[in-house]
Amino acid sequence: MRELLENTKTNGFASFVGYLILITSILSIFAFHSPFSLNITKTLEQINSINHPQKDKNGKCDLFKGKWVEDYSKGPLYTNATCTTIPTSKDCFLHGRNDKEFLYWRWKPHKCELPRFELDTFFQIMRDKRLAFIGDSVGRNQMESLLCILSQEEAPIDVYKDAKDQSRTWFFPRNNFTLMVLWTRFLVKGVEREGGVYDLHLDQVDEKWGYNVSQGLVDYAIVSSAQWYFRKNYLFEGGKLIGCLYCNEANLTQFKVSFAIGKAFQTTLSYINGCKNCKGMLTLVRTISPTHFENGTWNTGGHCERSKPYNKENMLISSKNNDEWEVRDIQIEEIERAKKEGYWKGQRKFQALDITKVMLLRPDGHPGSHWRDKKKKGFNDCVHWCMPGPIDVWNDLFLALLS
């Protein structure tokens, strides 16, 4: 201000600046006593209160590169006693899991700290907004974790569920926040044949979720799909059969899972980029959640009975994990493609919720045999995640990206 006064003196405008300062002072006094100033102050306080990831001294922070560290200082954000919406199949303690050590590990990025989920921060960001999880039962698994976390602050209203209880909508009236699952196996159109085999039209989105997005009914979306591709399916483009997955038919090209998923995500993200009512919508692609079957697969007696995270010395990588990592790389490529496409088309925003490596280290977090009554025989669940459990960190990472 001193330099400005000196410059104005030399230019002969000192008196003008004096009047300007006087007027500004009067306006400042008025604003201080105005009710509008309270809103401005409150907004600034809210922005400053958001807990950002603490960067290291080099100013670099990759939330998804790190390790799990044992930490008994804080327990889970909810329990099966404080959250009434935990699905029975994810309530591992209900079905006889006795060890609780797997709850006391936190994800530590190499060069920063990941903040613990803060309810106030989340609702500040999401007030008057709609968040949709677009994907299969693993995507719903994350929504169920978030629902339990949020219910510690406000009891949600169960607004809608479809006939198969796959797509769901919950509403938080105090914050005018809507939480949805738009359930889809493949993201793209899938027509079922007999025996759980599907014809996948890789260039057409599944209209179940496409309609809601196209109507501008979603402000934030977490998009995911993977495990339904690891089985026999037939692939179509332009209405024509181009090949298959796991079919071993002589006259058909057998493609890798990563090819099919890459095409599906390209179609999905291009659809969002081309959506006229999606300006301002933030889309996060949640990368593939790895499985941890040992000594078999889901239908051949495979199990997951470990009680601690992997470290570098004892890490077991299956051939399927290698395929899953390849899928993760393809998903990241499609996110980058969508970012470039969105840059030219408008205000589309894309981010990666890159949980693959984070969860590859957690073979101890699955229900395994603890998802059903012990008297009932069946397969072990090494795909989904116990609640509470390691899956809760997905929402820590989600909020950190939003912040």
Image (spheres, helix red, strand yellow):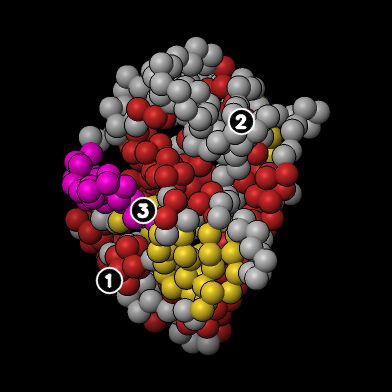
Determine whether, in the image, residue 186 is placed left or right of residue 363: left
Q: Nearer the viewer, residue 114 or 33?
A: 114
C-beta proximity under 8 Å, tags 2 and 1: no
What is the crowding at mark 1: few (fewer than 14 residues within 10 Å), some, or many (at least 20)? few
**Residue, x 60% and y 22% (percent of image)?**
305
Which amino acid type is shown beneath numbered disc 2? Gly
Position of residue 389 measured from the top left corner of the image (x, y, whole percent): 49, 28
Picture coordinates of residue 172, whole percent (x, y): 23, 44
Membership of 315 in magenta stretch: no
Part of the protein shown in magenta? 156-184
Residue 351 lies, with reference to residue 49, above or below; the image says below
Mark sitting earlier along the chain (3/2): 3
Instruction: For residue 150, say whether it is visible.
Output: yes
Q: Residue at x 46, y 44 (%)?
A: 138
Tell me if residue 177 comes above or below residue 151 in the rendering: below
Which residue: 34% across, 67% down? 207
Q: Nearer the viewer, residue 321 or 23?
A: 321
Q: CA distance from mark 3 to mark 2?
A: 27 Å
Q: Earlier in the sequence, mark 1 or mark 3?
A: 3
- Disc sitting over residue 215 in the figure: 1
Farthest-out residue, front: 250
- The reply, left or right, for residue 321 in relation to residue 187 is right
Q: Residue at x 23, y 39 (%)?
A: 156
Q: Dot 3: what SS?
A: strand
Q: Which label belongs to residue 302?
A: 2
Q: Nearer the viewer, mark 3 or mark 2?
A: 2
**Amino acid type, residue under disc 3 in the picture:** Trp
